[in-house]
Amino acid sequence: MTDTPSRLTFGQETSATLRLATPLAAAAVAQMGMGLTDTILLGSLGRDALAAGGLGAGLFFTTTAIMQSAMTGVGVLVAHARGSGHVARISPTFRAGTVLALFASVPVMVVLAFLEPILLAVGEPAQLAHDVGRYELILLLGAPASLLLATQRNYLAAINHPHVVMAVTVAALLLNGFLNYGLLHGAWGLPDMGYLGSATASAIALWIMAAATALVIQGWPALRSHLFGGAIDWVLVRELFHMGWPIAGTVAVELLLFAASGLMMGILGNAALAAHQVAISIASTTFMVPMAISQAVNVRVGFHLGAREPASARRAGLVAFMLGIGFMLMAAAAFLIFPRALALLFNLDPAVPADAEVITLVVSLLAVGAAFQVFDGAQVIAAGALRGYKDTRLPMILAAFSYWGVGFPVAWILGFVLDAGPAGVWWGLAIGLMAATVLLGARFWRLSHDVERNHSMSGP
């Protein structure tokens, strides 16, 4: 916690943001690697295991990702406390976030516990619904750990210790692979649990990650007092809830848009759906970088606002935009220059007619994805900067309008009414993300300007 609340140059702010964002990006990629490991190992048990385990894991991590985002307020409030010098607020904020995480895990576990009847109600095959339901009954035990991890990660980022997050996640990637293989196949003396072994391994890995992170905090003298000691401040719990639920809503409407795009691709055929999954996998990987920058900027903005330096807070937002858009422009260039090579990373064989069709579609989608990526990166950074201002409700409304008032209708019209096919659906997504970028970016520009002007008028 070495930062001091002072005005930083553009270069200094860039360096500070990169020091924070780089370990967070590495941790996010490692987290994706855990999901990829699960998918690969489940595939060794056959198509049915892959379908049930893949769908079960996807539903679990989508649900928990929405609720994890509600923990973002922990990092914002801790950053404000550090910037203002009110470090005594850090410990009660962390405790309040821990309590909120435990409460938030309850609805997640309830939904997952009743997933089988939910899947049957939406028309999924009975055997698949049954298999996914059994998978979730094990995996849901990891939900509290998943949300506790979100609180810990936001706290550690806000006190400038993101390297702890990275180290724990990378170690967990290796542990998860070991446990998955062992429990799937009964190797190394572990029980042979079949596809349910993947759920068991993931739940165990989540709890070990949460426990390991808590032990690091407990073992660090400067951080030890932030762990459990002291009373719970219920006012802070309510503040975190009121700040967090709109963030969860924002993430939910975006994730639902991408889920809807997958359903639209399914209507267009198996080749379109396969190409969509490949292209989305590529786009999701590059998206980890601006997402990490978004997490960093809410801390940087919050720190400067706590220090009553709104000009520095605005500069931190602009630095984040520069870094995120700069990276995504490089990603866009790769999409345009090497689309076929990227498609071939997914074991598609150009000599097989069905695979050749998918490769052609992936190339066309990545051409659209070049624009898609830039806007996706910009909007998530804008949302992160606004969270540093504790501004979450209006951004949720703007995001919902952009995704569902603009993105979804345009995707449907282009994809089906105008018969533009898969590329049309993706152009709809890109236009929705463009709308979010414009609206959230304008909101940041106006809010940061108003806060800076009001500060200058009120005096130091």
Image: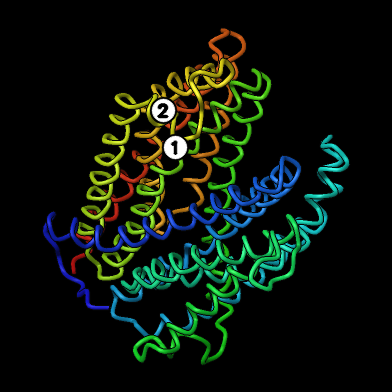
Mark linked to residue 170: none
Asked if marks 2 and 1 touch (Cβ < 8 Å), the reply is yes
Count of number-bearing discs: 2
Q: In the image, is residue 422 above or below residue 389?
A: above
Circle 2 or circle 1, nearest the eye: 1
Q: Quadrant of residue 100?
A: bottom right
Left or right, 154 with reference to 5: right
Q: Quadrant of residue 191?
A: bottom right
Residue 109 appears in view? yes
For the residue pair 93 and 55, the one nearer the viewer reads as: 55
Residue labelled with disc 2: 369
List x then y, in percent, for residue 311. 20, 57
Residue labelled with disc 1: 282
Where, quadrant-wise, is the C terminus in this rendering? bottom left
Left or right, 438 with reference to 218: left
| Label 2 residue SS | helix
List x then y, in percent, for residue 156. 39, 72
List x then y, in percent, for residue 323. 25, 46
Q: Amino acid at mark 2?
A: Gly
The furthest residue to the front: 188
Q: Residue at x 46, y 66 (%)?
A: 169
List x then y, in percent, for residue 52. 74, 46
Q: Residue at x 28, y 73 (%)?
A: 83
Q: Residues within 10 Å of mark 2 (few under 14, many from 20)?
A: many
Q: In the image, is residue 154 above or below residue 422?
A: below
Q: Earlier in the sequence, mark 2 or mark 1?
A: 1
Q: Amino acid at mark 1?
A: Ile
Left or right, 90 with reference to 305: right
For the residue pair 308 and 115, the one nearer the viewer reads as: 115
Q: Residues within 10 Å of mark 1 (few under 14, many from 20)?
A: some
